[in-house]
Image: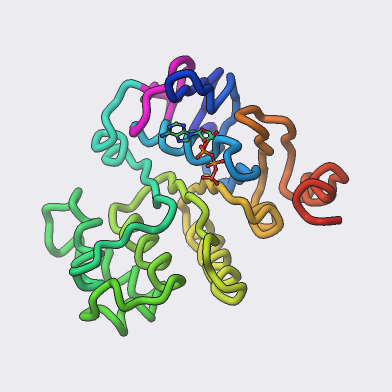
Amino acid sequence: MIMLKVENLSVSYGMIQAVKDINFEVNEGEIVSLIGANGAGKTTILRTISGLIRPSKGIISFQGKSIEKETSPKIVSSGLVQVPEGRHVFTGMTVMENLELGAFLYTDKKESETILATIFERFPILAERKHQDASTLSGGEQQMLAMGRALMSRPKLLLLDEPSMGLAPIFIREIFSIIEEINKQGTTVLLIEQNAKMALSIADRGYVLETGKVVLEGTGEELLGSSEIQKAYLGG
Ligand code: ATP
């Protein structure tokens, strides 16, 4: 079943057309990766899906309903949640307070406590540091906190914007294996990345973007093996 469908999407910033008539979809249960170099339009696509930017053209449907005119809070409460680039944890607040912010959809305290317990199980380091200010976490831990906060609202579709950015290789591997686990437990994932190798190795399917256009698509495996990808992104 198609969960997210993007049809003929174009997005402009004034005179600059950042996204040019692109089409892609994400099926329920999949991990789909959008890869591409700096400036290819990846972040613009995610922000448009999340309702933060309005497209100049095109349709975005989530679970069969078009959402391109919806507000972001509405989109979030329908189950589509983005973890922004650069993580954006709230400093001056503890790890716990950051996570509680993610539970804003739940008025039932019991329910949010249950979800919190599952998040702490998945990210034991966050449980250990729950009373620490978020600013004291390492980059990898902040990425976990940002993902944990998004998971507090029990998303159906999680949008991840460059989770590997600025992280040491050991943290990158850890974050990607957590993404796989989250997916196995039932959350569909749309991932955008410059780290093509990692993003394609966990993806069911992927799309390659170049200057706002989809130039290549296939299964993660096909793309990893393609000579174009090897040349352009994997230094091979
Ligand atoms: P990055 O990895 O650097 O985030 P990206 O693939 O996510 O790259 P976008 O950030 O979506 O790319 O940018 C796509 C294009 O749109 C680029 O040419 C960029 O310069 C331009 N752009 C992005 N944001 C704005 C903005 N607020 N105003 C004007 N142009 C912008």
Question: In this view, which residue lies farthest toward the top?
Answer: 57
Classify residue 67 by image quadrant: top left
Q: Quadrant of residue 114?
A: bottom left
Q: Kindly identify the residue that appears in the image at 30 percent across and 41 percent down.
A: 76
Q: Quadrant of the N terminus?
A: top right
Q: Which residue is nearer to you in this view: 37 or 60?
A: 37
Query: Going 41% across and 67% down the picture, which residue do you hit?
Result: 144
Residue 196 to residue 19: above or below = below
Range of magenta residues: 52-68
Q: Residue furthest front?
A: 15
Task: Tally the numbered discs.
Answer: 0
Q: Position of residue 233 (x, y in %)?
A: 75, 50
Q: Position of residue 139 (x, y in %)?
A: 44, 71
**Up-down: is 53 above or below 149?**
above
Residue 74 in magenta stretch: no
Query: Which residue occupies 54% across, 73% down?
Result: 171
Q: Position of residue 26 (x, y in %)?
A: 55, 37
Give me the residue at 42% from left, 31% from top: 48
Q: Is residue 32 left or right of residue 49?
A: right
Q: State left or right for residue 136 relative to residue 94.
A: right
Question: Could you say which is closer to the camera, residue 134 or residue 176?
Answer: 134
Residue at the outermost bottom position:
128
Q: How is the image coloured?
A: rainbow
- The relative height of residue 52 versus residue 227 in the rendered view (above or below) is above
On whether residue 61 falls in the magenta region, the answer is: yes
The C terminus, quarter of image: bottom right
**Residue 35 coordinates in the image, percent (x, y):** 64, 44
